[in-house]
Amino acid sequence: MNVELHNLSVSYGETRVVKDLDLTIGDGEILMLVGPTGCGKTTLLRSLAGLVSISGGEIRLGDHRIGPATLLPPEKRNVGMVFQDFALFPHLNVEKNIGFRLRDSAPADRWLKALNLEPWRHAMPETLSGGQKQRVALARALAHQPGLMLLDEPLSNLDASMKDSLRWTIRDALKEAGVPAVWVTHDQDEAMSVGDRVGVLNEGRLEQVGTPEECFAFPETRFVAEFLGDTCFLSGQLDGRTTARTVLGDVETAAVNDASGKVDLLVRPDDLGFDAAGESNAEIAWGRYEGESRLYAAKLKSGEEFRIRVGHEVRFEPGQPVRVAVRAGHPLVAFSAES
C-alpha cells in the first residue's frame, strides 16, 4: 500500500498537535517515529488509523484519499495496529485471538508458526508472558493481511532483555509480510537499530526524516542532534566550508544551513579521545563505569566540558590532567553559533 501524508494537520480543539506534515512511506518500509512526550507521535498514528479526524491536509492510503471532509472509517482502511498494552481478548485462547473474524485459518496458522507461538496455541492470555502476548498481538494484526501496520510503543511494557530480542522478532515479521509500518517509540536505541528510516518529531513538526545513519551523523537541526544521542558542542571559527579552527586544533566540518563564521561543532563521546603525547589541556571532572566502556567528563582549560567514551580498561581519577583530542573519522557537523 502506498502511504502519503500531504500538509497534514490534526487539532484538539484550538490546539494543533500535528502541523503541516508531509511524509511518504515506501512499500515494505519500517519508519520509526521518535520525539519527546507530547510531540504528536501517537496522534499521528491515530490519524492514520482513523481513530482521530484530521483538521487539514490529506492522507493517501492506496487508492483512498482522506481529508477533513472525506472521512474513511477505521474498518475500511486495511490498517493493522499493535498497542503497548497488547489488547488481547481475555476470553479467547491464542489461536482464536489470532484468527478472530477470519474465515480462513491459514493466515493464523502461518503467523503462529512464524512467531514461534505453536506451543501456546491453546493457551489463554493470562498465562502468557509480556513478550508472548505481544507476539500474539502482532500475529493477529498480520493474519488479517493489512496494507499498513501501526505500532504504538509495542515494547514499552517489557523488560530490557525482552525488548532487545523482540524488536528483531517484530522487524523480521514485518519484513516477511512485506507490509509498510509506522512504529512509534520513545527509545532512541530501538529507533536507530530497527528502522529503515527515522522521523524525528518536535512540537507536531517533522524536524528530519532519513536513515538512522543520516539522522545521527548529519542532523539537520540542533534538536535532532541533541535528541538522538549524547551531545556536546565545541566552539569554532569556520574557515571556508570544510574546516573550523578550535581549541583542539583544526577540524574537518560539514556546515548545516549555510553556517559561517562562529560555529558550534557537534561532538559525541566517541568523537573525542585522550592523547598520551603533548601538554595537558583538560582535567577529568568525573567518570562512570558502563561495563564494556567508561564515560568521562573532561573540562578543557577554555572552560568547555565534554563527555568522552573509552574502553573499560582506561582509568582516570577526578582532577587528573589529561590531553583531549578529536578522534572522529568523519566531518563534524557545524551549526551557526547564533542559531
Image (cartoon, rainbow, N blue to C red):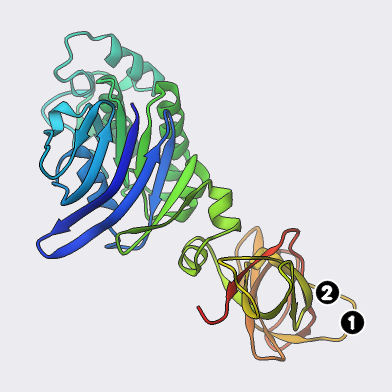
Is the residue marked by circle 2 packed among few (<14), some (14-19), or many (20+) residues within 10 Å? some
Give the spatial CA distance, label 2 vs label 1: 7 Å
Label pair 2/1, CB-CB below 8 angstroms: yes
Element type where label 1 sits in the image: loop
Q: Residue at x 29, y 27 (%)?
A: 62
Up/down of 82 relative to 92, above or below? below
Residue 287 in sight from this viewpoint? no
In x, y percent, where is residue 40?
Answer: 27, 57
Disc 2 marks a residue whose amino acid type is: Asp
Work out whether residue 271 or residue 106 is closer to the camera in this orientation and state it. Answer: 271
In x, y percent, where is residue 160?
Answer: 43, 50
Work out whether residue 19 or residue 117 is closer to the camera in this orientation and state it. Answer: 19
Q: Residue at x 15, y 27 (%)?
A: 76
In x, y percent, where is residue 90?
Answer: 13, 32
Q: Quadrant of residue 1?
A: top left
Q: Quadrant of residue 267?
A: bottom right
Element type where label 2 sits in the image: loop
Residue extending farthest right? 277
Disc 1 marks a residue whose amino acid type is: Gly
Q: Residue at x 42, y 33 (%)?
A: 26
Residue 102 in sight from this viewpoint? yes
Q: Quadrant of residue 261?
A: bottom right
The disc at residue 278 is 1
Which residue corresponds to mark 2?
275
The disc at residue 6 is none
